[in-house]
Image: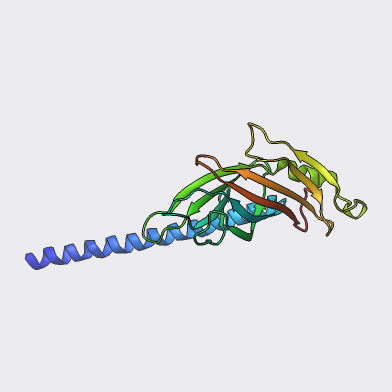
Amino acid sequence: MKKGKRNLFQLAVQRRRRLRAKMHSLIEGASRAADLESSESVMDNLMGLLRVHVKRGVNLAVRDVRSSDPYVVVKMGNQRLKTRIVKKDVNPEWNDDLTLSITDPDIPVSLTVYDHDTFSKDDKMGDSEFEVRSFIEALKTYTNLEEIPSGTVISRLKPGTDNCLVDESAIYVNDEGKIIQDLFLRLRNVECGEVEIQLQWIHYPGSKTF
């Protein structure tokens, strides 16, 4: 009798294991299909790529004893990219290029500075935000860049309560004939700090936007 019960118990355990393995396989398959569908959707709606050149930080907050080990995280929708860590510097120069896929120009881009800690959670050192619609509108307006002299300012954005700009932001044609935007961003939710970045557009062949 005891042996029969033991056999039944073992069969039940085996059935549960097989069911669990089957469910895991189905979930993985659904996840891969969703990722593929998401990837295809992004490619169908892709306007182009935005290269965010994270230049430097200025007067960042101290989060360690006398300094910080800052790095920057840039997010747009589900995209998350980060710069390298600069050790013991509240005026770091990253000069890192981060590339975002743009499908909707109305989605804002967030920027958060963190202090890297080895044995504890990384501390926030402020955040900021910027929009890309003005930059993309300038790209749409000026398509024949060969006819525009380098240094030509296409548009200027003023600092205001509705943005994080420290100074006026110029959208202009650089010496290589590309449209560039310089931004000096004020960090929020922190005692001090600013971050300087530069935007550059990378055209995607087949994009319906341009």
Task: Please report the residue visible at 89 percent of the width from the left and 51 percent of the height from the top.
Answer: 144
Point out the image quarter for the N terminus: bottom left
Task: Please report the residue visible at 64 percent of the width from the left and 42 percent of the height from the top.
Answer: 130
- In the picture, measured across the screen, residue 203 lies left or right of residue 74, that is right
The colouring scheme, among rainbow, by chain, secondary structure or one colour, is: rainbow
Q: Residue furthest top?
A: 161
- In the picture, measured across the screen, residue 30 lies left or right of residue 200, that is left
Residue 105 coordinates in the image, percent (x, y)? 68, 43
Q: Nearer the viewer, residue 74 or 185?
A: 185
Residue 19 coordinates in the image, percent (x, y)? 33, 60
Q: Is residue 53 visible?
A: yes
Task: Please report the residue visible at 60 percent of the width from the left and 60 percent of the height from the top.
Answer: 94
Q: Nearer the viewer, residue 110 or 1?
A: 110
Q: Nearer the viewer, residue 7 or 96?
A: 96
Residue 44 coordinates in the image, percent (x, y)? 69, 52
Q: Residue furthest left?
A: 1
- In the picture, measured across the screen, residue 175 lies left or right of residue 99, that is right
Q: Residue furthest front?
A: 66
Q: Is residue 108 visible?
A: no
Tally the numbered discs: 0
Residue 165 coordinates in the image, percent (x, y)? 66, 40
